[in-house]
Amino acid sequence: MRYSVAMTGEVEAAMRDHLIREDGQEDVLAATYVLSTGVERTTALIKSVVFPGEGERLVHGNASFTSGYVLRASNEARAAGHGLALLHSHPGSRGWQLLSDMDWETESEYERVARGITKMPLLGMTLGGRDTSWSARFWFDRSAPTWAESVRSVSPKLAVTWNNEIRRIPSITRSQQRTVSSWGERTQSSIARLRVLVVGGGSVGLDVAQRLAATGLATVGVMDYDAVETVNLDRMIGATRLDAALGRSKVKVASRLMKSAATAESFEIHNHEVSITDPVGVSAALDYDVIFSCVDRPWPRAVLNALAYTDLIPVIDGGIALDTFPDGRMRNGIWRAHTLVPGRPCMACLGQLVIGDIPLDKQGLLDDPEYIAGAHREAPSRQNVAALSASVSAALLAQFVSLTAHPGGRGVPAPLRHVLSTHTLEHSVATSGPYCAYENATTAGDTRTPIAEHREDWRAIVYERATKKSPFRLRALAAAEDILQRAISRLK
Amino acid sequence: MSNEIGLTGPTQQFINDMTALGATARADGPRILYDVVAVGGALNGQTMTTGVSVSEVQSWPMVPPHWIHLPDSVAFPETNMDDIDCQPGWKRHSRDFSYTDMSMPPALAWLRHVRGFISIAIPKAA
């Protein structure tokens, strides 16, 4: 299991403002956290800050907690069902901080207090004052801490402090020179270590996945339970007639194309032939730092909309709608891109997710012609063209760059809407609604309201594909293609 | 009437939210029932008992219910309907719920939706 810590930009700013003192001395602080548990990663989400009262901590060059402060914070954490985090600053230091003997002893001693009261491990965190970098460790017992891999602050700017011992800085390769010259080695070393998941391996997802691989990311996952069909070939650039004839899974096609595009010295692909609307898909998604939502149905988008806030994993979403005249000519095309993070409105607040449609999607009614006719609804529009789906992937990737590289010192913009007929780019003025159930569940972590459900339908599709035997001619072509791909991948 | 299935957190939340708005809700087997007053149509002024399936509020308030349970005696010009989770002599009706205004509590939005739907009921054909 890997470990990490995440917090909203608002919480991070409150903690930073307390810990970095004008007089340059160290300070201490307590906070509470909840867990967000994935398959391979557990994340502590900082929930609330417990500021010290008068006389509850001693500032004397090296700051220290009083036992009364730790006990009060532990009891507040327990009352809320949270764990306890103890934080301190190293004002003159930069980068991931290790523990001095004194810090080790302090956290080790309070480990028993915290665990005894909250029944959860103590979380220790340090802030390096020179570059506001965070470090973190979990104390499962008092003997030694288990170090986290990263600490991320999530707001319109994603800022990650990496533990270089656990997640090593990927080497810069010859093929990445122009990328690195665009944003520098430091940004490259952070972006390349992000674990990014692309949900939906269709026209947009396939394009996004390949460009992430080409950017030099070390780990990219693709999640889709569906297969390539002939009808997809006008938009899935890189998918072949053989893929469609074999009914290859979209994640396998994405995997092949990502391998070809990857520029990292060591590139790790995670194929998830599962549905994000199933708990297994949600658990897998919780292992990632950023998620691209390349799906267009209400239910999966609702699941991702929730995860962005409940588990502090930025979700970059978008889509396209093409409009035609009655005679079939194109009237207009609109594509949108927005990043879902605390500080930006969710899809429901944006009007991009009609939550009343989610139960219809869950019940399969949006695919039921009889129901659609009875409800006097229009069947979902399916028009799309390759020339414009590239605009969607470009818009999503630009959001990713704004989120992670902060060009101009800014993070992600307000939600963007591109209107083809008028050639305009509009910035949405939508704001978060005070009763938004999604944003009000920020940092819920494992106590999140479940939207995903165990279902057999997608499992049956995956099983049928895995057990289907293709004609010999197609299998021979696939084998020849595989040999060719392996040979190409060995080229340096 | 019996409460045959355990209530999950979201189900209880739906009951609490509706009750807080004056539509006192109670579990009744696989459904939750509550009362609303029709403000128009054939039932104008009448207090009607209506409900939703428990299975539809498992993700409340992030995912609202869709089907509206009503006695057979209530008729509409045109809806999809069936009798899943309904008590004998009841039907559940489909009506698009286009809730996008997050400045309104989810339960209030649902209650207004249901009230609006009941208010377009027509006299049942003899």
Image (spheres, helix red, strand yellow):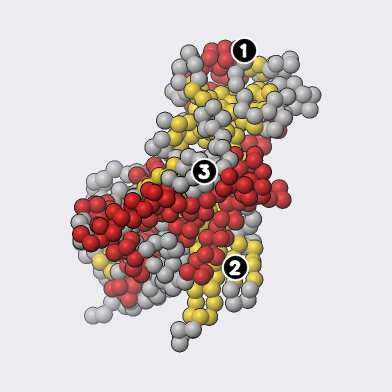
Could you tell which of marks 3 and 1 lies nearer the N-terminus?
A: 1
Q: Is residue A384 visible?
A: yes
Image height of A356 relative to A147, above or below: below
Q: Is residue A362 left or right of residue A262?
A: left
Residue at 38% in and 52% down: A485
Name the secondary structure under disc 2: strand
Name the secondary structure under disc 3: loop
Residue closer to the observer: B35 or A109: A109
What residue does disc 3 label? A264
Q: CA distance from mark 2 to mark 1?
A: 56 Å
Measured as percent of width and height from the top left, residue A473 is found at 23, 62
Q: Which three-letter amino acid code belongs to the residue tagged 2? A: His
Q: Quadrant of residue B94?
A: bottom left
Chain ID of residue with mark 3 = A
Could you tell which of marks 2 and 1 lies nearer the N-terminus?
A: 1
Question: Nearer the viewer's eye, disc 3 or disc 1?
Answer: 3
Measured as percent of width and height from the top left, residue A175 is found at 57, 48
Q: CA distance from mark 3 to mark 1?
A: 40 Å
What residue does disc 1 label? A102
Residue at 70% in and 33% down: A131
Could you tell which of marks 3 and 2 lies nearer the N-terminus?
A: 3
Local crowd size for mark 1, using a 10 Å CA cut-off: few (<14), some (14–19), many (≥20): few
Residue at 44% in and 73% down: A383
Q: How many marks?
A: 3
Name the secondary structure under disc 1: helix
Chain ID of residue with mark 2 = A
Chain ID of residue with mark 1 = A
Residue closer to the observer: A386 or A472: A472
What residue does disc 2 label? A418
Q: Which three-letter amino acid code belongs to the residue tagged 3? A: Ala
